[in-house]
Image: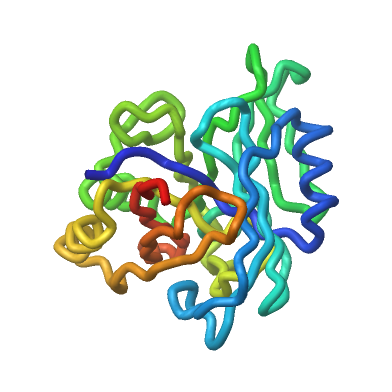
Amino acid sequence: MIRHVQHCNVNCSDLNEALAFYRDELGLSPLIRTNPEPQDGGGFGIDGAAQWDAWMMSDGRANPVIDLLEWKQPLPVGRPQPADGLGLAALCIEHPSVNELTVMTDPDRTLLEVTPGSAVRFAGAVINVVDVEASNEWYGSVLGFEESAGGMRLPGDEFTISLRPGDVSIPAYSSATNLGVFRMAILVDDAAAAVAQVRAGGVECPDPVWLDMGPTIPIDGLWAAFFRDPDGACLEFIQAPQPA
């Protein structure tokens, strides 16, 4: 069963600087740190070892959170996607300090759309696509998203994805270590079953891989599977972990 959007990953060049911005400027709080030893990077599409240091930033809820991640091995590359680039292009945050839509950037120039709200709330993500109607159909038929005010949501979830027309000449990121918003993680009961579900819908999706999350959280690790939407946005299934 597909549950809800658990987090969006934002690759940053300096974790401490990014943490200070999301905490002090946006009012999010560090919730969980993941800093494992080097491990096989194949699940991320990385040849050889992969290692990172990351903080999950929360608005007070356990989900969704922003996964601020600094790659240690291999090192970060590229630059964040522009506003019209395909794939995951921006995060959406509600904040009581603004009276209208305000576009901000984090220290690496990742785009943030900040809208008025009664409290700080990580509300959603912008995904730019070639054909909005076709992408609405894909997210609905393959993943079970439903049309809602302002975008699409999984049933019972408050996280909204806004599918917008993008520039076909600016492809989605190809590297897992590219700076900016790289992937959107969806929590599922069973990663293997979720992979089978999307494969039945014609999606190429590799088998789940086991990821070590490091010594700072009370689980041994988790099962995850990475795949792409029709326009190249990286999506991830993460299996609900069991306490160690």
Q: Quadrant of residue 79?
A: bottom right
For the N terminus, give its image quadrant: top left
Which residue is more in the foreground, 243 or 33? Answer: 243
Q: Is residue 18 left or right of residue 130?
A: right
In this view, which residue lies farthest toward the left? 200
In this view, which residue lies farthest toward the bottom? 48
Q: Quadrant of residue 178?
A: bottom right
Establish if 175 lies above or below 155: below
Q: Residue 18: x and y, percent?
A: 79, 49
In this view, which residue lies farthest toward the front? 244
- What residue lies at 46% left-to-right and 62% top-to-bottom? 234
Q: Residue 48: x and y, percent?
A: 55, 87
Q: Residue 71: x and y, percent?
A: 68, 68
Answer yes or no: is residue 84 visible.
no
Answer yes or no: is residue 208 visible.
yes
Q: Residue 215: x and y, percent?
A: 59, 58
- What residue lies at 57% left-to-right and 68% top-to-bottom? 173
Number of marks drawn? 0
- What residue lies at 66% left-to-right and 36% top-to-bottom? 113
Which residue is more in the foreground, 209 or 111? Answer: 209
- What residue lies at 41% left-to-right and 24% top-to-bottom? 149
Establish if 215 lies above or below 140: below
Establish if 84 lies above or below 151: below
Figure coloring: rainbow
